[in-house]
Amino acid sequence: MQVIITDAWMAKSRAFHLSGAKLILSLLGLSFVLMLVSAGLYHWVFLKGAREGWPIVGSLVRLVVKDEFAQRDRYMRENIEVLAKKLGEMQAKMLQLESLGERVSGLAGVNPADIKIKPGQGGALVNGRDLTLQELDATLADLDLLANQRTDVMTVIESRLFEQKIKKMMVPTQAPVHDANLGSTFGWRIDPITGRSALHTGLDFPSEPGTPIYSAAGGVVVTQEFHSQYGNMVEIDHGNDLITRYAHASKVFVKKGDLIKRGQKIAEVGTTGRSTGPHLHFEVLVQGVPQDPQKFLNAGRHLPATQVAQAKAPAAQR
């Protein structure tokens, strides 16, 4: 394509040669320029009309703004309704958690009345009208406070349950010898050596030499020595002035000061000291006074009652 441009007197002329590609690029450039000019004029007219209050332009601007605000309001209302629904579900779960906390606190021995908590609230979500952002924010604040209070309650309950578990682990309720019959029981009996009546201060468990001896509860070894009466002896302190004694062992695997776990192997059955045969002599002392170990073992239900009743080995062991 050839374009010729001349002046008014036809004295000068200039020719331009446009190929197909150049023509298309020229048209695209011209269209882009026209679009920019149109957009600038449109923007300038609307701004000037809105600022100066032109009748037609001002009405159009107000209509556009009104529609935009209506869409925003509808969007906000829909989102508030969704949040309110989820907030209601959270309140229901908090009430369930409160009920569960009361039941668990009873098991832990914690009186909920002793813990100051704010009663559950949330009437704003069930009043049958649309919520405002202020009401939504206030309800969220109440839920946050309630959640913190429930956390405090659960922390106290967890602490109490842990304390009870520790105390239980420190009470000698586990049998010191597994699958062993019970020989001499606690109380008065005829001494197998002197033949006279004497107080037997523990329980005897006749077993084969080398049978493992286990700690009846967790604690700290306070004595590990050879005693003229008890032979190889171990004493474990469980706190609260409660001590267990394991006597006549052939081998001992712990020493004074060791921290012992419940059910840990501490020695093996033997016949050292004042003994007439291989067995474990097991004692429980509270404030230094011998107690009947069978009461503790029965509390742990580790020795069936039928086994205890039928187990009557010769009273020739201590």
Image: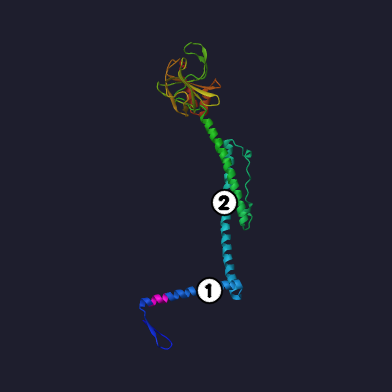
Q: Report which residue position mark 1 lands on.
A: 42
Q: Does the magenta stretch include residue 203?
A: no
Q: Can residue 100 be seen in this view?
A: no
Where's residue 285, x and y in %? 53, 22
Where's residue 109, x and y in %? 59, 35
- Alpha carbon distance from label 2 to label 1: 51 Å
Where's residue 87, x and y in %? 58, 52
In this rendered view, identify the residue nearer to me: 181 or 127.
127
Main secondary structure of the magenta stretch: helix
At horizontal 58% and vertical 68% (from top left) the residue drawn is: 65
Q: Report which residue position mark 2 lands on.
A: 89
Q: How crowded is mark 2: few (under 14 residues within 10 Å), some or many (20 or more)?
A: few
Would residue 76 appear left or right of 25 to someone viewing this image? right
Where's residue 137, x and y in %? 60, 53
Element under disc 1: helix
At horizontal 57% and vertical 69% (from top left) the residue drawn is: 64
